[in-house]
Image (cartoon, rainbow, N blue to C red):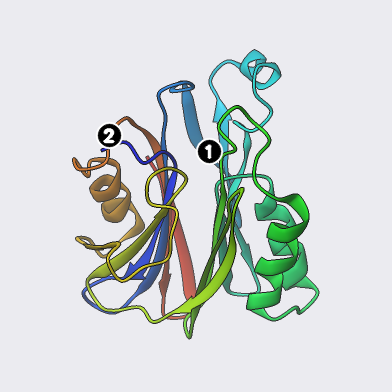
Amino acid sequence: MYIGRFLVVGKTKEGKPFVCYRVSSRSFPNRVAKIIDENTVAIIPKDPNEVFKNPYIAYNCIKIVNNTVVATNGSHTDFIAEKLAFNYPKRDALIYPLATLDYEKDAYNTPRIAAILDREECYMGYVRDDELRVKKVELKEGKGYYLSTYECCAISEEQVIDIEGETPEEICEYILNYKEFEHPVTCATAVIDKDKIKIAIL
């Protein structure tokens, strides 16, 4: 099944909260995840000229702010992170950027998806051309909620998968190679391990 770009938020079997972002693409497969610094992961095209074909294919997908992880499928990562830096509540930090930026104005009206995660709680959100929703979710050990741009753009107990791995590297490999979801391109994961947030890309 092709579900486009997607997020997975959950806990490892040992109870570590994590968020993973995977790019799946049929139109722009030549992209990579790159660690910009200890707090930022970006999605960038291998050929910089591709940005001129589609402005939505290069963006920061993970930002860490005050021991909180933001993960999204677009430029709204930075806007959400900025709200958190100004001490907005997590729910509001999701609502304002999603409502303001709206869905992507491409040929598919691609939804914007997002998650905010720390050691204590997690919020997921999305904006489609027909709906805006933000919801707090209770994470369960060994399980992950997934939220995608196509087919599965919803926050639902039915959209849960088993999770393998304890490190960000292991989770990246597991999600990138998750066979049910087609056309994998690249992946980035942040795992909250006690008082540290570890990131990895694949």
SS for dot 1 = strand
Q: Residue 115 vs residue 190: left or right? A: right
What residue is rendered at 27% in x and 66% in y? 158
Image position of 8 with respect to 184: above or below: below
Q: Which mark is residue 154?
A: none
Q: Badge 2: how crowded within 10 Å, few (<14), some, or many (20+)?
A: some
Q: Residue 105 vs residue 178: left or right? A: right
Q: Badge 1: how crowded within 10 Å, few (<14), some, or many (20+)?
A: some
Question: Residue most toward the front?
Answer: 130
Q: Position of residue 47 (x, y in %)?
A: 58, 15
Q: Which dot, 1 or 2, sits closer to the camera?
A: 2
Which amino acid does the dot numbered 2 rest on?
Answer: Glu
What residue is rendered at 29% in x and 79% in y? 140
Quarter of the image that includes the N terminus: top left
What residue is rendered at 76% in x and 79% in y? 87
Question: Residue most toward the right?
Answer: 86
- Name the residue that disc number 1 marks: 34
- Name the residue that disc number 2 marks: 182
Observer-nearest residue: 10 or 146?
Answer: 146
SS for dot 2 = loop
Image position of 119 with respect to 41: above or below: below
Query: In the rendered image, which quarter is residue 45 located in?
Result: top right
Image position of 16 with respect to 64: above or below: below
Q: Position of residue 79 (x, y in %)?
A: 74, 57
